[in-house]
């Protein structure tokens, strides 16, 4: 006998009596209450706890990859070479996510699989996703040069804070105010204070370095410049064997200047701060653009066309990010900026020094961005901007690997602690504002 259980009306539906010989039972889906399912569904993050877990893991990844690129620049590798390597694996991460999470389970009308969505008429949403990739690529490219001028910690604090102040506000209204405003906006205010403190930290640290270098002079060749390690496994501090080059000393600053790819001595620090603010504005726009791509708040899709699944949107997002990075960095090979030496595509192909680290950085950034978007789709993109606390991780690497702020003044240390404390408060408040998308 065939028995149908219709959960929508809580009825048992029996077939005609002639079918009693068939002892088969079918259960229809009670999808509106999530009790039964017709098959394996695409995996999407739906719970608030899962969203926060994604944000925390994204925070670790997104705070680590800038330290790796900074390490390579300090070893003398051209940023154009590094960013080309980084871009390849950054796109690879999006493809992996799309072909795994985006292909799990059956494709449905409401939630099509990744490959199904590639052929749908969803180009308005695709354009929003690709616009987000363009501004993110411009921001990431800019920070490569800002790190050399103002340091890893200050660069990440300024760009992340601007991202939160502008981007989070836009996402709050795009997400139909699902985040708690009375908690969210005080958190945004904390990030704004952190921007001011970061600028003060940079100014104080720059004054400390000028004081160290004042009166310091040496004839050509007097300083011993040791060769940096060729093995990728050895980090920055292992490259200076002489006691004269202890981190934080004038000798260390001079040796660093001689081996790094981007020369900063004699150049205005306003260049670095200007690059930081430009990058911050770019970063503040990519998350709202992705939000529009996945939720279609402006109703640009035709009736009956499903919204882009987060994995499909992330694929298009990464495609445009990759294209912009390739075009600009190949251009910079032949027409470099900031007095960098000219290079060529052939020279890039033959440059294997640190390539493994650059490829790893691209994977970390790609998976970090993907996790941020997965969490944002569940808990609101405004709350997902909590991953912009990545300077907490970057500052840790900056101090541990690069000796930032060593032998600095007491004033610099007080400002540094104040900046990081404000960031911790801001992150906690922003995560506490997380809502739940229906």
Image (spheres, rainbow, N blue to C red):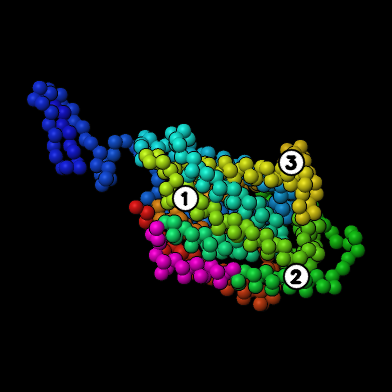
Q: Mark 1, residues whose alpha carbon is within 10 Å: few (<14), some, or many (≥20)?
A: many
Give the mark nearer the N terminus: 2 vs 3: 2
Q: Residue 403 in the image: x percent, y percent?
A: 69, 63
Label 3 SS:
helix
Q: Residue 265 in the image: x percent, y percent?
A: 79, 63
The N terminus lies in quadrant: top left
Q: Residue at x 54, y 53 (%)?
A: 286
* Count of marks placed on residues: 3
From where the camera sits, is residue 383 visible?
no
In space, the residues marked 2 and 1 are separated at their CA atoms by 45 Å
Query: Which circle, 2 or 3, is nearer the viewer?
Result: 3
Tell whether label 1 touches label 2 (CB within 8 Å): no
Query: Which circle, 3 or 1, is nearer the viewer?
Result: 1
Residue nearest the viewer, comparing 407 with 238 = 407
Q: Residue 140 in the image: x percent, y percent?
A: 62, 52
Tell me: residue 12, above or below residue 78: above
Say which residue label 2 marks: 209
Give the mark nearer the N terminus: 3 vs 1: 1
Q: Mark 2, residues whose alpha carbon is within 10 Å: few (<14), some, or many (≥20)?
A: some
Tell me: residue 7, above or below residue 372: above
Q: Residue at x 76, y 37 (%)?
A: 346
Residue nearest the viewer, comparing 283 with 351 = 283
Q: Quadrant of residue 62?
A: bottom right
What label sits on residue 348 in the rendered view? 3
Tell me: residue 20, above or below residue 353: above
Q: Main secondary structure of the magenta part?
A: helix
Label 2 SS:
helix
Say which residue label 1 marks: 292
Q: Which residues are magenta?
A: 176-195
Q: Residue at x 89, y 62 (%)?
A: 222
Q: Mark 3, residues whose alpha carbon is within 10 Å: few (<14), some, or many (≥20)?
A: some
């Amino acid at each position: 006998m065939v028995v149908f259980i219709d959960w929508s009306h809580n009825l048992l539906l029996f077939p005609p009596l002639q079918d009693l010989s068939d002892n088969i039972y079918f259960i229809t889906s009670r999808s509106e209450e999530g009790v039964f399912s017709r098959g394996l569904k695409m995996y999407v993050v739906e719970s608030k706890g899962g969203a926060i877990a994604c944000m925390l893991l994204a925070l670790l990844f997104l705070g680590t990859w800038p330290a790796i690129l900074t390490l390579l620049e300090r070893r003398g590798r051209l940023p154009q070479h590094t960013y080309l390597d980084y871009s390849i694996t950054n796109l690879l991460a999006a493809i992996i996510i799309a072909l795994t999470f985006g292909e799990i389970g059956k494709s449905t009308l409401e939630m099509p699989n990744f490959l199904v969505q590639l052929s749908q008429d969803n180009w308005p949403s695709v354009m929003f996703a690709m616009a987000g990739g363009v501004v993110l690529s411009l921001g990431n490219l800019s920070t490569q040069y800002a790190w050399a001028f103002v340091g890893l910690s200050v660069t990440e604090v300024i760009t992340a804070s601007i991202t939160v102040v502008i981007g989070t506000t836009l996402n709050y209204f795009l997400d139909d105010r699902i985040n708690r405003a009375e908690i969210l906006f005080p958190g945004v205010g904390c990030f704004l204070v952190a921007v001011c403190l970061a600028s003060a930290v940079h100014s104080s640290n720059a004054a400390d370095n000028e004081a160290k270098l004042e009166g310091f002079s040496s004839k050509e060749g007097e300083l011993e410049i040791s060769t940096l390690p060729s093995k990728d496994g050895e980090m920055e501090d292992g490259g200076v064997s002489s006691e004269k080059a202890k981190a934080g000393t004038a000798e260390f600053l001079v040796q660093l200047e001689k081996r790094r790819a981007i020369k900063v001595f004699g150049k205005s620090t306003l260049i670095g701060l200007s690059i930081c603010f430009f990058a911050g504005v770019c970063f503040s726009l990519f998350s709202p653009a992705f939000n529009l791509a996945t939720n279609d708040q402006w109703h640009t899709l035709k009736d009956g066309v499903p919204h882009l699944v987060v994995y499909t949107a992330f694929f298009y997002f990464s495609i445009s990010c990759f294209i912009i990075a390739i075009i600009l960095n190949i251009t910079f090979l032949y027409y470099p900026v900031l007095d960098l030496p000219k290079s060529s595509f052939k020279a890039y192909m033959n440059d294997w020094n640190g390539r493994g680290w650059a490829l790893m950085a691209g994977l970390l950034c790609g998976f970090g961005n993907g996790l941020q978007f997965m969490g944002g789709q569940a808990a609101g993109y405004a709350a997902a901007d909590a991953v912009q606390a990545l300077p907490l991780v970057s500052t840790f690497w900056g101090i541990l690997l690069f000796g930032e702020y060593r032998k600095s003044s007491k004033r610099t240390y007080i400002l540094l602690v104040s900046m990081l404390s404000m960031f911790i408060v801001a992150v906690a408040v922003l995560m506490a504002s997380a809502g739940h998308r229906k």
